[in-house]
Image (tube, rainbow, N blue to C red):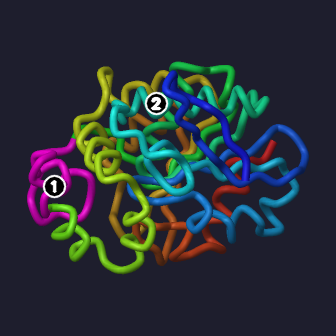
Amino acid sequence: MRGAVVTEAGDRIRWVEWAGDEPCRVYVHGLGAASGPYFTAVATHPSLAGRRSLLVDMLGHGISDRPTDFDYSLEAHADALARALTAAGVTGAELVAHSMGGSVGIVLASRHPDLVSKLVMIDSNLDPLTPARGVVGSNGIAAYSEEEFLAGGRAEFAELAGAEWWATMRLAGREALYRSAVRLARGTRPTMRELLLDLKIPRTYLHPEADGPLPGADALTASGVSVVPVPDCGHNVMLDNPEAFVRATAAALAD
């Protein structure tokens, strides 16, 4: 385990790292998750192994610190991740990021272009969402006020999330989980989709085939984004169908 200070208050982002060839490969989890449980098996698969690899936990999540005075916007997450990668001596990384992590990755590549050379997003948020009670996702959390969520909404949402997601979500800071969800549902200006369209690096978007055509796929493809449906999986593509995920990711990262 390694780490770096990423805020003026001394808060640290931490990651699991193993040695290998450059360029570095960086894996980033989604909302309420952690990179180790979600990515270790696929990152060490023979088709993806051999690169220096960092499995990073964003602030408020996993093994990283959980400051209660951090903004937790996508921009703040991206800037904190940039400081961690810079401290780790990473440039031109191949970024593989799930859900909220992919949204952060888009902002990271836009704000810190020297840090990202390729971007693989896994069913990531591209557009703002409308808050709605009873929904499993960032917009479900965003339907609460922060006071409601901390007082009892977190326990209610745990029932909706299910045991697998809750296994990592329960490790996230309460304020971090809520604020990250609200800011993810709110999105960025320009939107994540608009930022993605403007990026000039190789970009791949993996999504569950069962969800049907990805909204806006034609415009993404026209801008150079490879949109790849993955069979036999839900939102957690790398856990539900690791072999298909590895094939698609290895193809996306091939020279």
Q: Nearer the viewer, residue 150 or 234?
A: 150
Q: Secondary structure at mark 2?
A: helix
* Residue type at numbered disc 2: Leu
Q: Look at mark 2 in the image and give the residue it sits on.
A: 196
Q: Residue 7, image x and y in percent?
A: 51, 26
* Residue drawn at point x = 45 percent, y = 53 percent: 30
Which quarter of the figure is the C terminus placed in?
Answer: top right
Q: Look at mark 1 in the image and give the residue it sits on.
A: 149
* Residue type at numbered disc 1: Phe
* Residue drawn at point x = 52 percent, y = 55 percent: 228
Q: Earlier in the sequence, mark 2 or mark 1?
A: 1
Q: Quadrant of residue 82?
A: top right
Look at the picture and state if 69 lies above or below 33.
above
* Residue drawn at point x = 30 percent, y = 53 percent: 174
Q: Residue 166, image x and y in percent?
A: 36, 71
The image shows a total of numbered marks equal to 2
Query: From which residue to which does the magenta span run?
Result: 129-152
Look at the picture and state if 110 lies above or below 214.
above
Q: Residue 142, image x and y in percent?
A: 17, 48
